[in-house]
Amino acid sequence: MNQTEQKIKDLTALLNRYAYEYYTLDAPNVPDAEYDRLFRELEALETAQPEYKQPDSPTQRIGGAALEGFTSVRHTVPMLSLNNAFSPQNEEGVFDHAEMYAFDERVRGGLNGAQAEYVIEPKFDGLAISLLYRDGMLVQAATRGDGATGEDVTQNVKTIANIPLRLHGDNVPQLIEVRGEVLMLKADFTALNQRQADQNQKTFANPRNAAAGSLRQLNSKITARRKLHFFAYSIAQQEGGFVSEQHIQELAYLSDLGFSLPNGQFGCFPNIGEVLGFYEQMQQKRPSLPYEIDGMVVKVNSLAQQKTLGFISRAPRWAIAHKFPAEEALTVVEAIDVQVGRTGAVTPVARLQPVFVGGVTVTNATLHNEGETQRKDVRIGDTVIVRRAGDVIPEVARVVFDRRPMQTPETIDETNTSFLDGLQEDLFALPSEKHQTTSQPLYPQYRLPEHCPICGSDIEREEGGAVARCSGGMLCRAQRVQGLIHFASRKAMDIDGLGQRQIEQLVAQELVRHFADLYRLDITTLQKMKENTDQAETQSGVEAMPSENTPVLSDGLTNGKKPLPTKWAQNILDGIEASKQPDLARFLFALGIRHVGERTAKSLAQAFGNLENIRHAPEPVLACLPDIGSVVAHSIAHFFAQAEQQNMIDELLAVGVAPQEQPVTLPLAQYVTPERWISRLPDFKISEKKAAALWDLAGKSVEGLTRDKALPADWQQWRSIEANLSLLTTMQQFLAHMPSETGTIAESHASSLFGKTFVLTGTLPTLKRDEAQAMIEAAGGKVSGSVSKKTDFVVAGEAPGSKLEKANALDVAVLNEAALLALLNS
Ligand code: IVH
C-alpha cells in the first residue's frame, strides 16, 4: 500500500471515530477545529487520488450530486405498523391502563399463560428507515413507503452524522438490516425554522415534517445542512455476527455496532406493572427530551416468544404503541387579555376554557404579539388548537375556522356602528382564504388596546418591531413590579432577601412605588406588610408564611410600643442597606434602561467613570463609545432625557445610594472625536470622512456648525430643525466640560493588556467564565463574545466550540488557562 493510500485510510478511520465520539457518544475528544483540519486534509488527498477514496469516507457526509428522482426499493422484510393503546387520565391525573392490561392478557394468552418480559422504548415521532449493511458497509437506505416498497435515500442518509458508514467492533455481521427512526432534534428544528423565516422560506409545522422534508431532498447537500438524527430500534435481518435471543440484546448489539440508542429512555421490565410505571415517568419527562415522542413502544423481550406470537394483519402481536395524550388539544378562547412586562412590552394572552394538554390543565396561552395574533387570526369565541411544546408556555397553534361563531341576524346590532366599522376594516385588512364563510364573523379581528389596561397610559408600537409597549414606565404598576424585581436582582443591586414575592406585596400594599422607596422602608412598615399579607392569605385560605418569632434589635424609635421586629424584616433591611454602594455598572444595569444589559452598563461605566457624566451625555457622545450602536445610544439618551427618570436618580442619591466612581479606561476625548460624533448625529447619517470635511468647513468649532452660513444645504436643513439645533448646543456644553486627557485614567492603562480583546471558549480547568472575565477586565482588557480579526487572544478550555476554529483560521493567538494567568501576572 502506498503512503497516500495509507494516509487516506488512517484519516478516514480517525475522522469516523471522532464523529462517533461527538455525535453518538456525545463525548468529543478533539476540538472541532482539529476535526475540520483533518477533514480538509482528507478532502485534498481524495481529490488528488480519487482511486483511494474509502467507501466509508466522511467526505460523503456533505452530500453529493443531486438526483433526478428516487429509485424504489422492495423491502425483503416488510415494514409493518403497530397497534395503538391509550391510557386516558382522569381529572386527578390518574391513568386508566385498561388497554395495556388487555394487551398483556393477549400476550400471555398467546404464550399459553407464560409470563412475558417487556422492553419499553420511546415511540419516536419521525420517520421509519431501513439501513442495509454488507460486510460492515452501509450499502442501502430506504424509506418505509407503503411497507412493501420504499424509496432509495442512501445518499441522503449518508449525510446523517450519527449513522455509521462502517459498522464498529470485531463482531460485524456479513449482512444486517437495521431499522430505526430518522428525526430532527427540537433544537435543530427551532434553528432551522428561524433560518427559513429569516430567508423568507417556508417554515415547518413540526420536527416530524421537517425531518420528512429534509430526508426526501433530491439534493443531498440540503439534507446535510438540515442536521437529522437517527435512533435504531430493531434488526430486520442478519447473517453472521452476534446471535441475539432477546430484543434487549439486539439493542445492545446495535449499540456495539455504532448506533445511537435513546439512552436512559428505554428499559427491560419483568412485568406489565413495571412497564406502566416507566411509561408514566416518561410522560413526565416528555417535554424535556431533546426530541419529540408520541408514546412508548412496548415489545415482548424474548425473540422466541415474539415468533410464537407472530403477526395479525399488518401489526405484530408482540408489540404495541402505548401513546401519550396529545400535546395539542381543542378549546375555546373566552377572552384575549394583555400582559405587561418590565420593559412595558405588551403581550396578548388568550384566556381559554380549561383544557388538559400533555399532562397539565391549561387556561392561558400566549399569542406572542398583535401581528402573530392577526396572522393566525385568533378571535374571541374561536375554537383553537392549543399546543404545549417542549417549553412550558402553552401557545395557540391555530384556529379551527369552521367552528368560528358567525353573525346571525339577531347578533347584528344596527346601532352599534363602531363594531361594524371594525368588521369592515377587518375585511380589507386581512383577505383570508382560509375560512370559507358566507356571513360575517361575530367578533372582529384582534387589535391591541390603545391604552394599557393596568395604568391607562398609551400603548406605543415600535416602528417595524413586533413589540408594543405601555408608555407608562414606572407609572405602570405591572412595570413597577418587574422593574423593582430587576433592580433588586443578583446581577443588579443584589439586595438579599428581597425577591419577587416581597416586591409584589410591597407594591400591592402601596408601600413602595419606586426604587428610592426601598431605602425608606423601616422595620415597622415591613412588619405591617407581613401582617397584612398573612391576614389576607389566611382569609383566602392560603397558608400564611411561617412566621419567625426570633426577636431582633428594636429600631429604637418605637418606645417599645410596636410589635417585635422580626428577623425576617431585619434581613431585608440589612440587604437593602448593604446595597447602597454599588459598582457604577451594576447601578446602571439596575436602572433597567432598555437595551442596557450588564455588558453595556460596564462599557458605560468604564468610559465615563461616574454617574454625573453618563446622565448628561448627549446621544452622539454615547454613540461614539465602543460596543454602543445607535439604537442603544438612543435608548440611553431617551431614558436620561426624561425628567421623571432624572428625579428618580436624584431621589436614589438623596436616600444614600452612592454608585462608586471608577477610573476610566480611556479619556473620553479619544472616543468622542469630531468626525465620530458628527457622523453619529441622529437623522444625519454621513461617513466619518464627510463628517471630518464638514468639521473643517465649519472652522473646527461647534459654534461654526451651528451658525456658519456657508455649509452644505443638507446640513443647514438638518440644523434648521429646533431639536437638532438644541442638540448642537448640548454638544457644545458637553464638549466644553468633557474630562480632559489625563487625571482619571485607570492605572491599568499602563498594563500591557490595556485595550486588548479576549474571547473565552470552552470550560477552563479552574476559573469560572465570569471569574476569568473579571480578571481580564481588571487588567484593562475587554472580553468579547465573538472572534474577529480584531481579537487579540482566544482563551480556550475543555470542549471549545467554533470560536477556536475561527481563531485558528484568523491566526489569533490561543491561550489555555495557565497561559492566561501568566499573561495577567506579567
Ligand atoms: S418497532 C413491526 N419501535 O412506529 C413494527 N417502531 O407504527 C416495528 N416507531 O413506522 C416497529 N418508534 O416508524 C418501533 N421504538 C420504536 C418506534 C417505532 C417509532 C414508528 C415506526 C413505525 C411506526 C409503527
Image (cartoon, helix red, strand yellow):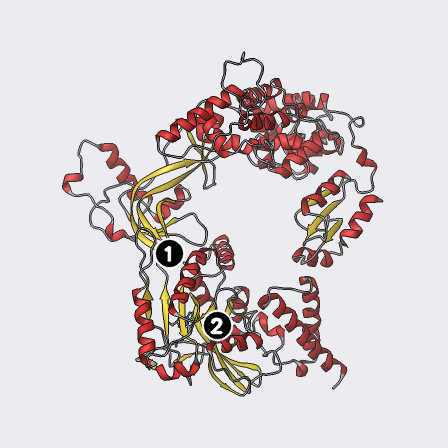
Instruction: Identify which residue is drawn at 52% across, 86% down.
Output: 175
Above or below for 62 versus 485? below
Q: Name the amino acid, label 2.
A: Leu
Return the x and y of residue 123 as percentages of the image width and height.
42, 67
Using residue 482 as the reference point, say whether residue 381 is left or right of it.
left
Residue occupied by mark 1: 327
Above or below for 100 versus 736? below
Using residue 159 as the reference point, say whether residue 776 is left or right of it.
right
In the picture, the disc for residue 218 is: 2
Q: Quadrant of the N terminus?
A: bottom right
Instruction: Identify which residue is drawn at 73% across, 81% down.
Output: 6
Q: How would you rate the neighbour count of disc 1 (Cα within 10 Å): few for under 14, some for 14-19, many for 20 or more?
A: some
Q: Name the amino acid, label 1.
A: Glu
Return the x and y of residue 397 as percentages of the image width and height.
37, 52
Above or below for 362 versus 250? above
Give the alpha-carbon distance from disc 2 to disc 1, as whole Å. Answer: 32 Å
Return the x and y of residue 474 as percentages of the image width and height.
49, 26
Report which quarter residue 658 is drawn in. Answer: top right
Return the x and y of residue 226 as percentages of the image width and height.
52, 64
Label 2 close to label 1 by CB (< 8 Å): no
Using residue 284 as the reference point, say whether residue 663 is left or right of it.
right
**Residue 453 visible to the viewer:** no
Q: Closer to the observer: label 2 or label 1?
A: 1
Using residue 577 as the reference point, say whether residue 344 is left or right of it.
left
* Mark 1 close to ligand 1, CB under 8 Å: no
Report which quarter residue 101 is drawn in. Answer: bottom left
**Residue 309 visible to the viewer:** yes
Above or below for 798 versus 304? above
In the picture, the disc for residue 205 is: none
Q: Secondary structure at mark 2?
A: loop
